[in-house]
Image (cartoon, grey):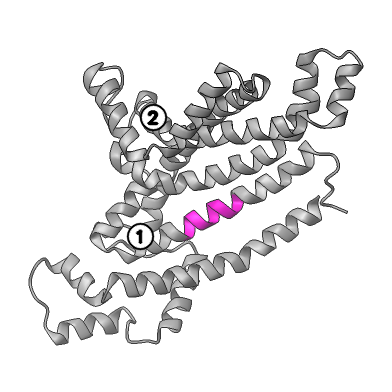
Amino acid sequence: MIGYISRRVLSLVPVLVIVALVSFFLIHFAAGDFANIYWRMHAGNTSPTKAQIEQIREERGLNDPLLIQFFRWFGEVIRLDFGKTLYTKEYVAKELTARLPYTLMLATAAVTIACIIGIPLGILGAIKAGRFLDGFIRVFASSGIAIPRFWLGLLLMYFLSYKLKLLPLMGSGTVYHLILPAITLGVSPAATLARLTRANMLEVMNNEYVSTAYAKGLPNSKVILKHVFRPALIPVITMIGLQFGFMFGGAVIVETVFSWPGIGKWAIDGIVWRDMPILRAFLLVMSLLFVTINLFVDIAYSFLDPRIRYWT
């Protein structure tokens, strides 16, 4: 197991280097001339002269080849120095450290809601397959996947905050501020988990060893939980890990709708400001979070299925 974990951790290194390289060049060409952006951020709406632009390019090393600029930037990133933002002039690492816990809190709350709602509904749908309850669960699953997050967020804000005054409209500060964005972010993964859990449960229930368990006289609850649910849970764990990673992408929209001070809203601000240091840091951190979650999911496999032995 230790050897497997070590190999997986080492395999993350080239992935992150490639992500850093691609994000650096994409943002460089998409954002435009860094010297002009830097001047606009620091000098307002005044038009710079060619000499002033050239001075900025010389001071910031923009006249060097792009590959040299990348290695210089990546060397600073390894030392956890992402530079300063162009808009606020604060250190990127400082703002990232302040905002990342909010996004992790939101994603954790959303995936918890998704598991609490989606997995039990999937189990019920499999047990009551073909009945009214199963049809209701399938309608919920289809609707939950189809509803856009921003529309659902606005709908919840209108009814639960504006009309009923039950929860804060937006912002942060208390656990009540977390409820609406967490529900908005968690509904779609809950629907996905419900469909996947139901499908896997039905597939496992058709196996011969399940019929044998019933023939031995085991109670229905024991057969479902021990002989059906556990084998069906392995693909669900994979989906939970993937959904947890995708939630960081979905958080960009949800955090903007609810003014939640996470890295998603921060990235939107960076796009508006065309702030390249923010966007580079955001893409790199998001990639690191996603591959780390996948690593934990792979490790969890061996505990759910004894047949899996990564250490051999």
* Prevailing secondary structure class for the magenta stretch in the rendered image: helix
From what the image shows, is residue 215 above or below residue 232? Answer: above
User: Type of residue at label 2?
Assistant: Leu
Mark 2–mark 1 Cα distance, whole angstroms, equals 24 Å
Q: Which residues are magenta?
A: 284-292
Query: Does the segment drawn in magenta span residue 290?
Result: yes
Res 113 seen here = no
Residue 106: % across, % down: 44, 36
Q: Quadrant of the C terminus?
A: bottom right
| Direction left: furthest residue | 46
Residue that badge 2 annotates: 178
Tags 2 and 1 touching, CB below 8 Å: no
Q: Residue lying farthest front? A: 130
Q: Tell me what residue is drawn at x 35 percent, y 60 percent.
A: 278
Picture layout, residue 93 above or below residue 178: below
Label 1 SS: helix
| Dot 1 amino acid type | Ile
What is the crowding at mark 1: few (fewer than 14 residues within 10 Å), some, or many (at least 20)?
many
Q: Is residue 176 above or below residue 266?
A: above
What secondary structure is found at the residue carrying circle 2?
A: helix
Q: Position of residue 306 (x, y in %)?
A: 85, 39
Residue in front for this viewpoint, 165 or 236: 236
The residue nearer to you, when weighing 104 against 201, is 201
Work out whether residue 110 can be spotted. Answer: yes
**Which residue is denoted by mark 1 in the rendering?**
278
Q: How many other residues sit within 10 Å of disc 2, few (<14), some (14-19) or many (≥20)?
A: many
Taking the spot 89% from the left edge, 13% from the top edge, the residue there is 217
Q: Is residue 30 magenta?
A: no
In this rendering, position of residue 5 left or right of residue 65: right
Residue 304: x and y in percent read 77, 37
